[in-house]
Amino acid sequence: MPSETIKQRFRRHPFQKRTIMKNIVILISGRGSNMQAIINAAIPNVRIAAVLSNSETAAGLQWAAERGIPTGSLNHKNFASRLAFDTAMMEKIDAYQPDLVVLAGFMRILTPEFCARYEGRLMNIHPSILPSFTGLHTHERALEAGCRVAGCTIHFVTAELDCGPIVSQGVVPILDGDTADDVAARVLAVEHRLYPKAVADFAAGRLIIEGSRVRNSENADAARFLTA
């Protein structure tokens, strides 16, 4: 029987395109609703390597553990300084070899050393339309300022609080009679859609940091299509 040709062999055993999984470590401080949204999205080519917290009682840890995801915690109160805690947390994170570290309600101000360690691969979500209303109590402050819209911002993290290149933003209306809780609930629903999309874009290599801006190649492709 004649030996098969390379072409025939390829038909029987076609080369498979290699899938490169991205390791994601998520940091939380509480229930981690954005963490849950990201995990529930089952993003292609994303492996949730671990969910870590600065509180051993964070409800999100149990939720993740019940789904077979490695979890861990370090209580920041047990460390003499912010840098000492961040150093220990970095060691814990690095054990999972993350491609991206996602802050999902991680209520800690990070040291410059932490931010530098994960520069370009540290992502956060903030409940305001940055650069407005950095810090806490964003919805109360938006109401006090008479804003007609509120929203959220996903950005890469830098040493400056709630700054860094913006990945995406979502906007919701502020209605007459709204309380801060009303606005928070409306914004949270947008967060749960926006954050998984940002992680998916990162995993697919679509996010390109150019100075203080982030270019999404998916948007560029769409623009080229529309103007063709």
Image (cartoon, helix red, strand yellow):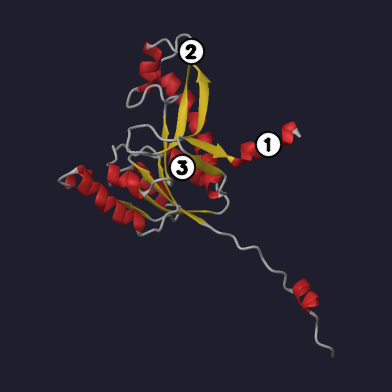
Task: Give left or right: position of 66 versus 90.
Answer: right
For marks 1 and 3, the one nearer the N-term is 3
Total residue callouts: 3
CB atoms at circles 2 and 3 under 8 Å apart? no
| Closest to the observer, 47 or 227 | 227
* Image quarter of the C terminus: top right
Q: Of the residues tagged 2 and 3, which is closer to the observer?
A: 2
Residue 54 visible at all: no
Where disc 3 sits, the SS reads helix
The kind of residue tagged 3 is: Gln
What kind of element bears circle 1?
A: helix
Query: Which mark sits nearer the N-terminus, 2 or 1?
Result: 2
Q: Which residue is mark 1?
A: 222
Few, some or many residues within 10 Å of mark 3 (<14, 14–19, 20+): some
Q: Where residue 218 sits in the image (x, y, percent)?
A: 62, 40
> Which label sits in the foreground, 1 or 3?
1
Secondary structure, mark 2, is loop
Mark 2 or 3, nearer chain start: 3
Badge 1 vs badge 3, beta-carbon distance below 8 Å: no
Q: In this figure, which residue is indicated by the disc labeled 2? A: 148
Does 138 sit above or below residue 20?
Answer: above
Q: Residues within 10 Å of mark 2 (few under 14, many from 20)?
A: few
Amino acid at the residue labelled 2: Arg
Q: Is residue 19 left or right of residue 80?
A: right
Label 1: few (<14), some (14–19) or many (≥20) C-alpha neighbours in 10 Å: few
Q: Amino acid at mark 1?
A: Ala
Residue at 44% across, 20% down = 183
Marks 2 and 1 sit apart, C-alpha to C-alpha, by 30 Å
